[in-house]
Amino acid sequence: MLKRMRDIVVATVHEVLDQLEDPKAMIKQYLRDVESEIRKAKDAIIRHQVMAERFERQAEEALRLAARRKMQAEQALDAGEEELARKALSEMKHWEARADQYRKDADKTTEQVRELKEQLGRLEKKYQELRDKKNALIARANAAKTKKRIHATLHRIDSESAIKGFERMEERIAQMEIQANAHAGVHDEAAPLAYADEVEKELAKLRARRSGSTPPDGGELPGN
């Protein structure tokens, strides 16, 4: 448990970034993993605290039994029952040894609880740091991916085949512009020819008006 917690605590932001494929998903998954380890650590701390308390109670009970056997040995000796006194004293030593072992187990478990709490504190601190940096990490990873795509696109554009393709398109567009301009010129030149006869008639009327004569088509001058 402690080794796994230490492995997570010492993991750096750079190690996370190196493994990113989908930045958002990977960072969220990493945070979920840390959350899971925090929950496991808290459960382990509770279990160890319960064990330490149980060892303490067992040590107290063993000492109580040892004290009783000592009292029984004294009573047996007072009654002249040395064999019973020896037996009681033997059990007293047994319970004293058990009490000593329970006390050692309690101390060891209490020390484990202290270590677990220390590791948990570091893990929670790292988790909070990662939560605070989550959006910044995602933005940096996305920027890196975007920059990579841009470079790839620029490389394709700069390639010889891409340049030749754009040159061919430019030539084709130029040809289309020339053709469009040519058609527009033909249209503009043909338009005056369509009204040539009417223009001559109007010109004759203007001449006749200025000279006071009858227009060539026999019509009356305007205003007569």
Image: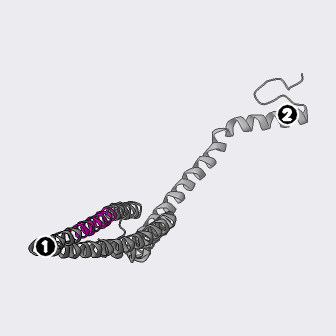
Horizontal arrangement in the rendering, residue 1 relative to residue 221 (left or right): left
Please, which residue is most extreme toward the front here? 79
Q: Is residue 180 visible?
A: yes
Q: Nearer the viewer, mark 1 or mark 2?
A: 1
Counting from the top left corner in percent of width and height, residue 9 is at 39, 74
Counting from the top left corner in percent of width and height, residue 152 is at 41, 72
To which residue does mark 2 refer?
A: 208
Q: In the rendering, which numbered label is found on residue 80?
A: 1
User: Residue 201 versus residue 97: which sits nearer the camera?
Assistant: 97
Which segment is the magenta one? 48-69
Q: In the rendering, which numbered label is found on residue 171?
A: none
Horizontal arrangement in the rendering, residue 70 relative to residue 86 (left or right): right
State the predominant SS element of the stretch in magenta: helix
Going 19% across and 73% down the picture, which residue do you hit?
92
Q: Looking at numbered disc 1 in the image, what kind of residue is underneath it?
A: Gly
Going 44% across and 72% down the picture, which residue do you hit?
122
Q: Earlier in the sequence, mark 1 or mark 2?
A: 1
Going 63% across and 43% down the picture, which residue do you hit?
191
Q: Looking at numbered disc 2 in the image, what kind of residue is underneath it?
A: Ala
Horizontal arrangement in the rendering, residue 20 relative to residue 89 (left or right): right
User: Residue 114 versus residue 19: which sits nearer the camera?
Assistant: 114
Q: In the rendered image, which quarter is residue 25 located in?
A: bottom left
Give the colour scheme of this rendering.
Answer: one colour
